Image (tube, helix red, strand yellow):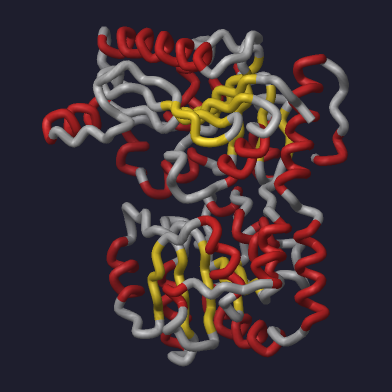
Amino acid sequence: MLSDQTFVCLTPERWNGLWRNRHQLLTRFARHNRVLWVEPRPYLSEALHSMRARRLEADHTLAWPRPQHVQDGLFVYRDPLWLPLSGRPPLRQITAWGRGLALRAAVRQIGGGQAPILWLFRPDQGDVIGQCGEQMVIYHAVDEYAAYEMEFQADQAANRPGRVQALEQIILRRADLVLVTSAPLLAAKQAWQPNTHLVPNGVDFAEFAAALAHPQEPAALAAVPHPRLGFVGAINEKVDLRLLSALAAANRAWQIVLVGPVTLRYNLDDLAELRAQPNVHFVGALPVTQVPHAIAACDVCLMPYRINAWTHHISPLKLYEYLAIGRPIVSTAIPAVADMAPLVGMAPDAAAFPGQVELALRQAPDEAAAAARRQFAAGQTWDARVERISDLIVATLTGRPVNEKGD
């Protein structure tokens, strides 16, 4: 296991937000290393709005930024509002210089004598390469971001064709190591960076096993009758809201439980229709410690994804969490579950989804099937993923051949 290194990680979300694979991986690396969790950088419009409204958060003031120690080995850092991202020269160059200066100072403050490892998660973060004197650059792709741009921002994309793809190609060429979470992403990124490797998402199996052994039903679910069809995760543009509305209408006895924040920017009419269904329950985000208990409190777990170029490339975190609890799973026909039968029931289209749910409910008492799901999940732990990434980092730094067993 890699140790005594400093990681500078530009994350797409706040530390105290919905837990994703970044939280799972970086908290584990922080046990033996120093991790600087760099929160999303402010844009000029955001900075101006906050200043005009005088809405400066306690940790995002006009003061010189300092990393906050949140747990052993892990520090959270935010760029100051007065150094925003801007596309306007000369402000762009001035603020970029200032952000680099502040970032290098933050790296020095958390300690460690050697050059850091820079870890990027988004195509628009390439401007940071070279700013902190890093010894290597990791790019970690968990989505096909260009597909999102074309699916939901076609009007902007028409004015800047391939902008996201162009930004990502720059990072792919400059990165020393590229990590991806799905086979379609591996095929897409290896063409630009040969040192690209598949590291799927994982699960904290021990935590989920404990929730199954000692269930504590979240209070938000207590009044919801059974059978419960549960979805855990952000309700965003990946989710097929029309499918869920049709599922709710197919059988009013089925209670659809949605655990997670609503982050939609598009398809708001579909969201309104779903909210109007009497047997659909929007629980909202739960603390990460309650998520295993929420899944255990459901009878069937849902993966109702839309079928498009974006979801073609995903590796749903919830897949491994559902499997760890052992409940039957019903998914739309995304590549991530194409080879998962009989562990996952797959509906070839939206019309077939209710039938798959009926089948899953009939199979719910099958303890042998539940044990098979849990056994599979037991081999997909975050600790194993961290060991794999650690091996890839060491191989990249030393120039030795990579063991391809994980690809």
Figure check: 177 above or below 342: above
Quadrant where the image shows the N terminus: top right
Q: Position of residue 205 (x, y in %)?
A: 72, 57
Quadrant where the image shows the C terminus: top right
Q: Is residue 357 visible?
A: yes
Query: Quick one: 47 or 59, which is closer to the camera?
Result: 59
Residue 92, by quadrant, is top left
Q: Residue at x 67, y 48 (%)?
A: 201
Q: Position of residue 282 (x, y in %)?
A: 38, 71
Q: Is residue 87 visible?
A: no
Residue 124, by quadrant, is top left
Figure check: 77 above or below 144: above
Q: Residue at x 67, y 75 (%)?
A: 327
**Number of marks drawn:** 0
Q: Position of residue 112 (x, y in %)?
A: 62, 14
Query: Quick one: 250 or 326, which is closer to the camera?
Result: 326
Q: Residue at x 55, y 23 (%)?
A: 8
Figure check: 37 above or below 320: above
Left or right of 369? Residue 7 is left
Figure check: 122 above or below 385: above
Q: Position of residue 101 (x, y in %)?
A: 41, 9
Q: Residue at x 76, y 26 (%)?
A: 2
Left or right of 299? Residue 219 is left
Left or right of 387? Residue 178 is left
